[in-house]
Each structure stands twice: as structure tokens, then as C-alpha cells.
């Protein structure tokens, strides 16, 4: 007879979830025993690292990924990382071990009496099967729930005495299911959209992370060229949906209400594709839209569509929608936008590089299809200006701003995409939230180039403290950190460089290495 254990591994294999990111405890051991040889277990030393690695893997592969956490304490440690996974629509199938069924009610050690409540509201679906026989079906539901649009994390709590239980042959039916989804706006809705776009006098397009997630980047370029539209990236960008040296490219919109309407002034139609409307951050109240502008929003996420405070929305798959829409759009006679000027080189201080110099060096030396995982909050604008990104899946930034994403996500992205070089650009503040990801990189030989920008401060908070009139706030500096020592402690070779030449040499060496390397760079503090 099949068991919960054997049917579950059949299911995972059939659905392509052969890589398990985890941190184990006693509750999880019956799941992990007899671990099949065609599966890979990737150990993270903290659950924030486990979820961060899985998140990177899921985002870069577009596929659901299995995470195995330890009960309540493990799930709790994972919650910060889940904020990012939720907002990046990352299809994570989180599982956690539970005490033996008969030991839950008495609240034994490691029992979670209300396991499904714990990860809410950061999961699409959360469940503890009512009986052992339901575990494989529940996991199948979890995988499909995570993968259907809008994608997102799900959670299943599994008592550890379930794994050895025998199940009926019919329980294996779930291992052979495919669940497909197709959806675009109706022909009439698309015709209405085309009519409004063709009629617009001065339209603009704002592109979000879902364009990149669906690999609709080239269609976005065609759309911008067809209507001769400037193309902005939606605020708080977590991915790069548009080639950054294209003539239509305008940069990333500021994350403030007044800032956005200021930048979009003069446009009569704003088309937002694959982003929430909008992911604001700084509080700068104002009008949502410039005078005389209409907004149309294309998204695959009903929640995003419903919660926007202005504009009309059409819900559907972005790639399919753009494919159907493009042939119905008339080639505009307007002039092409002028390409943005390239920024000037920046002078370095003795012993400290300008972050701009680091980025210029990266732009010059990194492979053109490198993947950047970025988590240094004060250098976002400079990075987008100076580092060319032209391919899909070139950029990942924490989607909810939850720090501790960058280091582990870089490891996960590199595991999912061994053919492209991953470069992690991480602030000296951010690096500490998930520093033990370096251990996983070293142990599994994942050749990420880690660059730590050490300005000895929470740079973005310095900036915020001026905006919020709170410059005297304590706790904004992080002096005394030695990332080379930390990296070596976790098994990663590291070097500190404080001149442009030394940085370039170290970077060349790291790019040629077949193992992870860390470069610590003392930098000046700039504004986001
Ligand atoms: N904790 C977590 C988990 N996420 C956060 N976003 C913060 C705290 C608050 N925070 C920011 O929003 S930016 C920032 C913090 C602490 C500073 C990050 O410093 P850094 O980068 O050194 O990584 P910069 O370039 O110096 O800003
Ligand atoms: Ca910093």
C-alpha cells in the first residue's frame, strides 16, 4: 500500500518540486527520512534564510518551491521573509512539522494548537489536514493554489505521525493532476482599451514586476514603441520589467503620491501594467493623478485591481493580454522619447568609494546578462541609472522592503539559474538580517559574488530622519562590522577594497571564481 510519505514524494516529483529548502526539527524528521536521491535538500541556518533562498529560487524559476520549516518557532522566524514572498507573488509551498496528532491538544512541546492561523495574513491558503489520509491531497491543493494567479505563498501543517500511514491507491490520483489557468480580458474589454490608447494624445506606460515575472518585457518594449510612450518603472521596484538603456526608459517612479503625479504631469492616459496602483512609501500627500489624466490598470491580481484608489482595471494574464492588444494598436506618429543622458563618473574619497563608482565598475565588468539581487536602500536610484539591465529576470529587490532577502535570495536565484552570474549588492545594514546565507552559499558551492557596501550606517533611515524631522533618533548607525571576518567565519573567501582599482581587480577575480566570494567596499553615504 502507498503511504502518505511515498505518495507525497511522487506528487512533489511529478510537480517538479525536487529542491527542498529547510531547517529541520524533530517534527520534520519523519518527512525527511528516506529522502529520495533525485531530490536536493538545501539547509539554511535560520528560517529567514530558508524562505529567502526559496523565494529567490521561485522568483528566478517561476516555479513553485517546497519549504520545510520547524513548527511554530520556525514559522515565526520565517514571517519577516514571508512579507516579501507575499508581495512578490512568490509561489512558495511552505510546510511545517506538527506534533503527533494525539499530543497536540495537551500542548506538548512543539505542538501548535492553531497552526493554520500562524502565517496569516501572509499566505493565500493555510491548512492542517483533518486526517493523515488527506495529507497528499492537501499538498496537491497547496501546490496548485500557490501556482494559480495571482501566485503566492501557502502553508500546510503536517503532524509527524502522518507520514507512515497507509493510504488507498486512489490517493495517488492527485499526483497526476495538471491544473491550468488561462484568462485575458474579453474581446470587448480589449477593444475598449485599444480605443482609449489609440485616441490618447500623450499616453505613458508604468511597468511593474509582474511584467518581468511573465517575461512580457519584449512586449512592453513593442507597446512603448508603438505608442511612442515614455516607460516608467512602478515605485518600489522589485524587478526590472524594461531595458534600462532603451530610448523610452524613464527610470523608477518615486514612491510618494505627490511625487508620482508630478512625474506624470501632462499625460492624458496612464497605463499601468503588472504593478499595484501604487506601492507608495514616503508620505507626501497630494493628488493621485495629474490634472486631466485617466488611469488604466492591467493586472493578474484581483486584489491589486480592487484596492487601487483610482482608475479602471482589467484583470488577466499580462503576456496574453499584451499579445492580443498589440495588433490592435495604431503606430503613433509622435516623436520617440529622447534617451536619458548617461550619468557622469563620480569622484571617490580617500579610503571610501562613491557607490556610483562601484556601480560603474559593475556595469563595465559584469556579464551583460548578470542577475543583480539588490538590497542597499540608499543607493537604489544610482544603481538604476548606472547599471544597464536588458534581459528578463535581471533584478530582484525585496518586494515588501523586508530586509534579510538579498543574501539568501541571491543564493536561491543562483541555484535556479546556474547559467547566469548572480551578483548580490547588499548594504552593511541589510547584510546582518540573514548573514548565515553565506554558509549555505559556501557549503553548496553557489558561486554568487557578494558585494557589501559598508557606509557604517542605515543610509536610507538617515535620509528619512531628515524628512520626518527626527534626525536625533538613536540606532541609525552600524559601525564596527567586519564583513570579511564574518564571511570567513561562514566559509566564504572575502576581501576588502577601498580603491576603484582594487575593487575592479577583486570583482574580476570573483566573476571568474567557481565558488562564492565576498567583496567588502567602504562607501560614502548617498541619498535614495
Ligand atoms: N528591519 C527590516 C526587517 N526591514 C526593514 N526595512 C527595516 C528594518 C528598516 N530599514 C529600512 O527600511 S532601510 C534600512 C532599515 C534598517 C537601512 C538599511 O541599511 P543598509 O542600506 O546599510 O542595508 P543603506 O544603503 O545604507 O540605506
Ligand atoms: Ca548602510
Image (tube, rainbow, N blue to C red):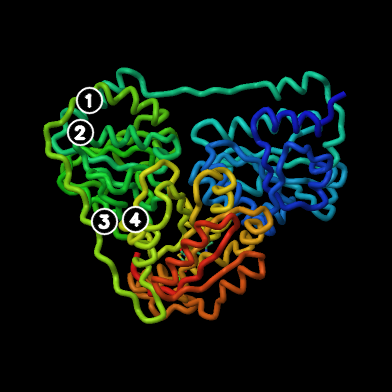
- Find out if the beta carbon at label 1 lies less than 8 Å from the nearest ligand 1 atom: no
The quadrant in which residue 17 appears is top right
Q: Residues within 10 Å of mark 3 (few under 14, many from 20)?
A: some
> Which of the labelled discs sits on residue 224, or is there none?
none
Asked which quadrant contains residue 418, the reply is top right
At which x and y percent is residue 337? 17, 44
Between the residue at mark 3 and the residue at mark 1, the CA separation in whole angstroms equals 30 Å
Q: Quadrant of the N terminus?
A: top right
Residue bearing the label numbered 3: 259
Say which element carries label 4: helix
Q: Is tag 2's residue or tag 4's residue first in the polypeptide sequence?
A: 2
Q: In the displayed structure, does residue 307 sit left or right of residue 311?
A: right
Residue 186 percent across, percent down from the top left: 35, 20
Residue 227: mark in rendering: 2
User: Is residue 275 something one can see in this rendering?
Assistant: yes
Q: How far apart are the alpha carbons under marks 3 and 4?
A: 18 Å
Residue mark closest to the camera, 2 vs 4: 4
Q: Residue at x 34, y 68 (%)?
A: 527
Q: Which residue is mark 1?
A: 329
Between the C-alphas of marks 2 and 4, the distance is 24 Å
Q: Cβ–Cβ below 8 Å for labels 2 and 1?
A: yes
CB contact under 8 Å: marks 3 and 4: no
Q: Position of residue 230 (x, y in %)?
A: 22, 43
Q: Could you classify mark 2 by the number of other residues whose Cα lies within 10 Å: few (under 14), some (14-19), or many (20 or more)?
A: many
Q: Quadrant of the C terminus?
A: bottom left
Between disc 3 and disc 2, whose residue precedes? 2
Amino acid at each position: 500500500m502507498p503511504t502518505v510519505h511515498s505518495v507525497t514524494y511522487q506528487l512533489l516529483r511529478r510537480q517538479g518540486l525536487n529542491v527542498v529548502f529547510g531547517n529541520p526539527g524533530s517534527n520534520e524528521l519523519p518527512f525527511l527520512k528516506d529522502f529520495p536521491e533525485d531530490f536536493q535538500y538545501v539547509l539554511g541556518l535560520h528560517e529567514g534564510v530558508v524562505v529567502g533562498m526559496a523565494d529567490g529560487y521561485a522568483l528566478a524559476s517561476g516555479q513553485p518551491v517546497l519549504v520545510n520549516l520547524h513548527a511554530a518557532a520556525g514559522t515565526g522566524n520565517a514571517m519577516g521573509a514571508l512579507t516579501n514572498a507575499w508581495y512578490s507573488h512568490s509561489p512558495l509551498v511552505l510546510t511545517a512539522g506538527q506534533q503527533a496528532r494525539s499530543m497536540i491538544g495537551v500542548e506538548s512541546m512543539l505542538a501548535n494548537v492553531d497552526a493554520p492561523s500562524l502565517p496569516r495574513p501572509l499566505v493565500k491558503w493555510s491548512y492542517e489536514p483533518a486526517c493523515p489520509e488527506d495529507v497528499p491531497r492537501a499538498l496537491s491543493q497547496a501546490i496548485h493554489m500557490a501556482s494559480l494567479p495571482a501566485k503566492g505563498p501557502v502553508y500546510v501543517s503536517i503532524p509527524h505521525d502522518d507520514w507512515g500511514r497507509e493510504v488507498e491507491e486512489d490517493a495517488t490520483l492527485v499526483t497526476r493532476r495538471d491544473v491550468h489557468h488561462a484568462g485575458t480580458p474579453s474581446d470587448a474589454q480589449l477593444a475598449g482599451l485599444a480605443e482609449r490608447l489609440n485616441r490618447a494624445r500623450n499616453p505613458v506606460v508604468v511597468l511593474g514586476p509582474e511584467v518581468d515575472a511573465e517575461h512580457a518585457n519584449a512586449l512592453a518594449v513593442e507597446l512603448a514603441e508603438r505608442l511612442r510612450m515614455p516607460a516608467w518603472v512602478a515605485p518600489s521596484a522589485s524587478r526590472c520589467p524594461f531595458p534600462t538603456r532603451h530610448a523610452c526608459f524613464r527610470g523608477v517612479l518615486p514612491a510618494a503620491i505627490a511625487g508620482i503625479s508630478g512625474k506624470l504631469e501632462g499625460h492624458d492616459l496612464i497605463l499601468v501594467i503588472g504593478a499595484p496602483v501604487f506601492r507608495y512609501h514616503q508620505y507626501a500627500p497630494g493628488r493621485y493623478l495629474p490634472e486631466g489624466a485617466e488611469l488604466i490598470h492591467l493586472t493578474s491580481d484581483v486584489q491589486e485591481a480592487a484596492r487601487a484608489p483610482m482608475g479602471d482595471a482589467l484583470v488577466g494574464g499580462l503576456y496574453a493580454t499584451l499579445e492580443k492588444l498589440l495588433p490592435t494598436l495604431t503606430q503613433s506618429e509622435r516623436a520617440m522619447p529622447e534617451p536619458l543622458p548617461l550619468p557622469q563618473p563620480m569622484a571617490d574619497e580617500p579610503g571610501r568609494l562613491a557607490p556610483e563608482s562601484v556601480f560603474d565598475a559593475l556595469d563595465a565588468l559584469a556579464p551583460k546578462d548578470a542577475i543583480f539581487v539588490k538590497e542597499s536602500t540608499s543607493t537604489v536610484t544610482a544603481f538604476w541609472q548606472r547599471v544597464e539591465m536588458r534581459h528578463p529576470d535581471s533584478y530582484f529587490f525585496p518586494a515588501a522592503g523586508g530586509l534579510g532577502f538579498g543574501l539568501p535570495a541571491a543564493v536561491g536565484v543562483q541555484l535556479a539559474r546556474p547559467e547566469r552570474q548572480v551578483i548580490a549588492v547588499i548594504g552593511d545594514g541589510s547584510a546582518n538580517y540573514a548573514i548565515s546565507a553565506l554558509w549555505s552559499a559556501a557549503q553548496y558551492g553557489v558561486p554568487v559574488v557578494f558585494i557589501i557596501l559598508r557606509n557604517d550606517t542605515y543610509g536610507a533611515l538617515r535620509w528619512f530622519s531628515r524628512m520626518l524631522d527626527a534626525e536625533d533618533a538613536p540606532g541609525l548607525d552600524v559601525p564596527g562590522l567586519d564583513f570579511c571576518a564574518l564571511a570567513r567565519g561562514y566559509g566564504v573567501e572575502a576581501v576588502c577594497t577601498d580603491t576603484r582599482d582594487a575593487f575592479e581587480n577583486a570583482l574580476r577575480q570573483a566573476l571568474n571564481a567557481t565558488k562564492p566570494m565576498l567583496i567588502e567596499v567602504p562607501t560614502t553615504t548617498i541619498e535614495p
